[in-house]
Amino acid sequence: MSFLDLSAIQKSFGPVQVVHDFNMSIEKGEFVSFLGPSGCGKTTVLRMIAGFETPSAGTIRINNVDQTSLKPNQRNIGMVFQAYALFPNMTVFENVAFGLKVAGKPRAEIEARVREMLSLIRLDHLASRYPYQMSGGQQQRVALARALAVKPQVLLLDEPLSALDAKIRVSLREEIRAIQRQLGITTVFVTHDQEEALSISDRIVVMNAGRADQIGTPSEIYNKPATRFVASFVGTLNLIDAEVEDPATNRIRLGGHSIAIRDSLATHKAGDRIAVALRPEAASLNPSSRADTQIPGEVISSSFLGSVIRTRLKVGGNEISFDMFNDPGLTPPAPGEQVTLHFAARDLLAIRD
Ligand SMILES: Nc1ncnc2c1ncn2[C@@H]1O[C@H](COP(=O)(O)OP(=O)(O)O)[C@@H](O)[C@H]1O
Ligand SMILES: [Mg+2]
């Protein structure tokens, strides 16, 4: 039995349905990310778990106890928001102590727990500061400590890093993950940033217009995207139009070439148009023993992205990008140059629409 169970959840605001039949079972201690573009319903699902919104249909259970009609303060859930929602007129200590005070805990217990939390986020030395005297990253660590102080059953984080600069975002996400592991707390983390979700999650729910398009580990989501939406939202992906040549042998025609792909085409018939996907890192201008397929193309442009150089090619009616690792001695191919692209047919994914 899973720890946090969302079963057939729906939510409408007036006539507009924003969450459709959302199902998710989260194990105790698991770190799950909801990943999707702005407006796809991530916050709404999180707010239903917390009890700030009531589902129009469906059931929310924690540890096998139905929470659906409980008020937020009856659920024992910790929440961290995007904007620093600290109380501006309270010190760090008072902010972290807030939930424990409301719960009427004895003074000595509050003192000890707050010290423990401040040491967990490595801010012991700033206990008497006010929020305005701290950086955004420090404020979010305090918000995390405040959420965890009451020993919640579930921790919910709604884009907690999106207001911070890139460097802090990366270090704080690692810190959040380390603290989450240390405490073993069941966590739902909302983000629209695919790299963030891929880097810290046990599992990811890719959300699209109020639905879960795919639920899987970061590797499953990245390497085996189930839908066109997941394929294009998670990572950079070439979507290439092709034609089914022979469903029995999984052969497609791509730019005048016949290629056998890994995925089954059994549900298609010869002549069907399909989309196949190829990651930019899976193709190269250099032959290799793994790359069993070659197609000619014409260079459109090359752009320097730091660690990699990304080149766009015109291949038949398609555009395909591929990456080469940066090397100071490397001259990227020039626009107009005719080249041969090498890749492994098994890296082509058939995409379901
Ligand atoms: N209280 C509300 N009343 C009406 N519509 C809402 C309300 N809250 C959210 N929505 C709508 O629900 C959809 C999903 O919103 P939200 O869950 O905030 O998305 P996300 O967090 O993924 O950006 C959006 O179209 C949003 O405008
Ligand atoms: Mg949101």
Image (cartoon, rainbow, N blue to C red):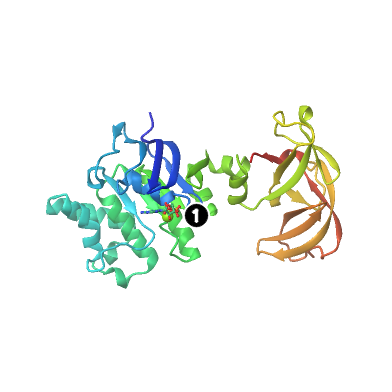
Q: Is residue 201 above or below residue 98?
A: above
Front position in the image: 166 or 317: 317
Looking at the rendered image, the quarter that the N terminus falls into is top left
Give residue 91's position: percent from left, percent from top: 23, 66
Residue at 54 percent of width and 52 percent of height:
194
Give residue 231's position: percent from left, percent from top: 62, 46
Figure quadrant of residue 277:
top right
Front position in the image: 345 or 18: 18
Within-10-Å neighbours for mark 1: few <14, some 14–19, many 20+: many
Q: Is residue 34 visible?
A: yes
Mark 1 = which residue?
192
Residue at 21 percent of width and 53 percent of height:
99
Give residue 11's position: percent from left, percent from top: 39, 44
Q: At numbered mark 1, what does the secondary structure look like: helix, strand or loop?
A: loop
Q: Is residue 127 above or below residue 191?
A: below
Q: Residue furthest front?
A: 15
Looking at the rendered image, the quarter that the C terminus falls into is top right
Give residue 141's position: percent from left, percent from top: 35, 59
Q: Is residue 11 above or below residue 129?
A: above
Residue at 33 percent of width and 55 percent of height:
144
What kind of residue is marked 1? His
Residue at 30 percent of width and 38 percent of height:
68
**Left or right: 265 in relation to 211:** right
Front position in the image: 327 or 337: 337
**Left or right: 255 in relation to 63:** right
Q: Residue furthest bottom?
A: 133
Q: Is residue 181 visible?
A: no
Q: Is residue 248 above or below residue 4?
A: above
